[in-house]
Amino acid sequence: MDFALRARRLGKRYPKAPPNVYALSDVDLEVPHGVTFGLIGRNGAGKTTFVRIAATQLEHTSGDLEVLGLDVRTRAREIRPRIACIPQESRPLYFLTTEEVIYLNLKMRGTDAVEARRRTRDVLAELELEPYRKTLVSHLSGGLRRRALVAMVFASDAELLFLDEPTTGLDPLARRQVWDAIRHAIREHRTIVLTTHYLDEAEALSARLALIDKGRVMLSGTAEELRARMPYPYRVTIAGPIAAEALHPYGRVTRIEGGYLVFARESNARDLARWGLEHGYRLSLGPVSLEDIFLEIVGRPLVGLEEGEEEPVAP
Ligand SMILES: Nc1ncnc2c1ncn2[C@@H]1O[C@H](COP(=O)(O)OP(=O)(O)OP(=O)(O)O)[C@@H](O)[C@H]1O
Ligand SMILES: [Mg+2]
């Protein structure tokens, strides 16, 4: 099978980094064609470094990376016309209007004028940027500027799009417009590499995900596969006059606002839900969220934890 991206033991050490500090270490990743691939991880995990290497903006220091079947080290010139990228903190050309930024980028990529005008018009409509068509990019708010950059990437005919935090700073409606644009791009059989700190977004959009921490891939696969790797794949929240001790046999108990969160195996989750319902307690039951997995793997305290976490007790 050929992949849109294929990294083998990819490593990156920045020249001025302290010895033995690697932004990426032994990264093995495969991104199939035509899907959205979500890259998640804490600040400094190495997401932007990965994106910049794959977008041929930065050189790796070890391992191999193929982009669209081509080695990034030797075939960057062939890769570039086939990819498009919004850098995480990019500054567009401020003396241009929103429309010009999109149109001129297409012209630079070699799109003919008629097609470039059509694509510009379509993307301005899709991301509801029409009212700002003639506004200088330098006069746009931060969120609108970001949308203009996202529009620039979607308007291109690139097969592989890199979206490094495309929705950071966007209002909830604008975020959803970007989501729709991502889904639209997937219907056009494009491939998207997405980084985001919004885990609901990562899960809603990504066919496959990778969680990286300190430059290493901790988990990768579909959201289901990630869940299946968790010792406790279910979460039950329960509220009522309950002593934590009563919950311990079911799984790992955490006190949260107004009640408890219990991570449990499937049969224990079911038993706990039945027990809770019999007692008339308020409860919810579902698979662990991507946020739960994230917090578990990168070793942060669990969601909503205000006081000390209860000791885990094997059910
Ligand atoms: N130009 C650079 N020179 C030296 N070190 C760098 C450079 N750019 C990034 N780093 C370091 O590399 C590591 C990974 O950074 P990177 O920007 O890839 O993280 P990230 O996952 O994108 O984080 P964020 O979520 O904050 O955007 C960090 O430790 C960072 O300090
Ligand atoms: Mg980053």
Image (cartoon, rainbow, N blue to C red):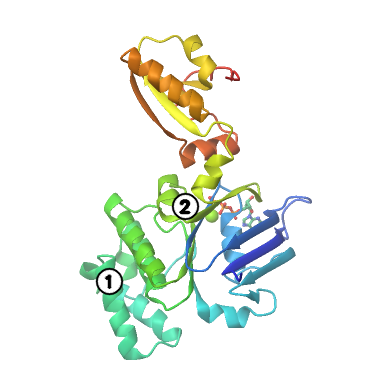
For residue 56, what is the image quadrant? bottom right
Picture coordinates of residue 51 (x, y %)?
57, 62
Instruction: Give amino acid for label 1.
Output: Leu
Residue appearing at x 50%, y 47% in the figure: 223
Residue lying farthest right? 19
Give the labeled residue for mark 2: 196
Q: Position of residue 124 (x, y in %)?
A: 27, 71
- Say the numbered circle drawn on residue 124: 1
Q: Which residue lies at the image location 40% right of the left edge and 51% below the top edge? A: 204
**Secondary structure of the residue carrying numbered label 1:** helix
Judge left or right: residue 160 versus residue 101.
right
Q: Amino acid at mark 2?
A: Thr
Between marks 2 and 1, how big is the CA–CA gap? 23 Å
Q: Is residue 256 visible?
A: no
Most extreme residue toward the left, as rendered?
131
Please tell me whether residue 188 is drawn above or below residue 174 in the rendered image: below
* Number of residues whose C-alpha sits closer than 10 Å to that of mark 1, classed few (under 14), some (14–19) or many (20 or more): many
Residue 225 at what x, y percent from top left? 55, 46
Which label belongs to residue 164?
none
Q: Quadrant of the N terminus?
A: bottom right
Q: Is mark 2 within 8 Å of ligand 1?
A: no
Residue 163 in the figure: left or right of residue 44: left
Question: From the viewer's perspective, is residue 146 above or below residue 300?
Answer: below
For residue 72, say whether it is visible.
Answer: yes
User: Across the whole image, how many numbered discs are drawn on residues?
Assistant: 2
Residue at figure coordinates x 39%, y 73% from the top left: 188
